[in-house]
Amino acid sequence: MINPGNILIATPYVIGDIDFHRAVVLIVDSNKGNITGHIINKKINFKLNKLIKELNISMPLFYGGPVATDRLFFIYKSSVKLPGSKKISNKLYWCGDYDVAIKYLNDKLISPKNIMFFLGYSGWEKHQLNNEILNKSWKIDENSILNYLFLKKIDNIWKDCIKSYGNEFILWQNTPRNPNHN
């Protein structure tokens, strides 16, 4: 069973899928078999404060997935829960009151190091993700969520995750993003 807080790691079998090639996805919701998550290792070449004029600090923006790319989502780590947010795991929350989040960032009540904003999300209908896992498109990591979140350098997250599966994907660890550039 796939639960909020699990990490999905794209295997090399998803080559050619521009959205999920080398993706690491944090699952944030599981509702009646429908799964929602955000890709945590794909920055957009655009700063969040350029999109949100009320934000006083420069922050990265991430591509959360191919669904609802015109909507903004966020996850954050804090001992203070924002109104309307959903708990993912210990001190890790999903969304909530957007205006309060921006205020807390500006007032330094939430550190920019402990929050990630995403355009869009990744979603799977009932049984869809299970079928993709059976087809070896994804591996599930149930234990190391905080090892991969809120890192300044996200370039190696996928490689680090895939290494944990031993020799199964050793060939792919140092292959360029586009194998044609090898």
Image (cartoon, helix red, strand yellow):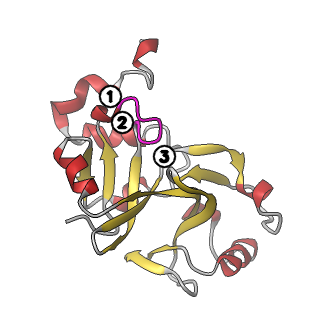
Task: Provide the residue span drawn in magenta.
Answer: 15-21
**Type of amino acid under label 2:** Lys
CA gap between label 2 and label 1 equals 6 Å
Residue wearing tag 2:
159
Q: Secondary structure at mark 1?
A: helix
Q: Earlier in the sequence, mark 3 or mark 2?
A: 3
For this rendering, which residue is in front, 60 or 113?
60
**Is the Cβ of the residue at disc 2 closer than 8 Å to that at disc 1?**
yes
Residue neighbourhood size for the residue with mark 1, other residues' Cα within 10 Å, grouped as few (<14), some (14–19), many (≥20): some
> Which residue is at a point 24% across and 27% down the rendered structure image?
170
CA gap between label 1 and label 3 equals 16 Å
**Type of amino acid under label 3:** Asn
Which quadrant would residue 59 be assigned to in this image?
A: bottom right
Residue farthest along the bottom direction in this orientation: 83
For this rendering, which residue is in front, 32 or 141?
32
Q: Per the image, is 47 magenta? A: no
Residue wearing tag 1:
173
Q: Secondary structure at mark 3?
A: loop
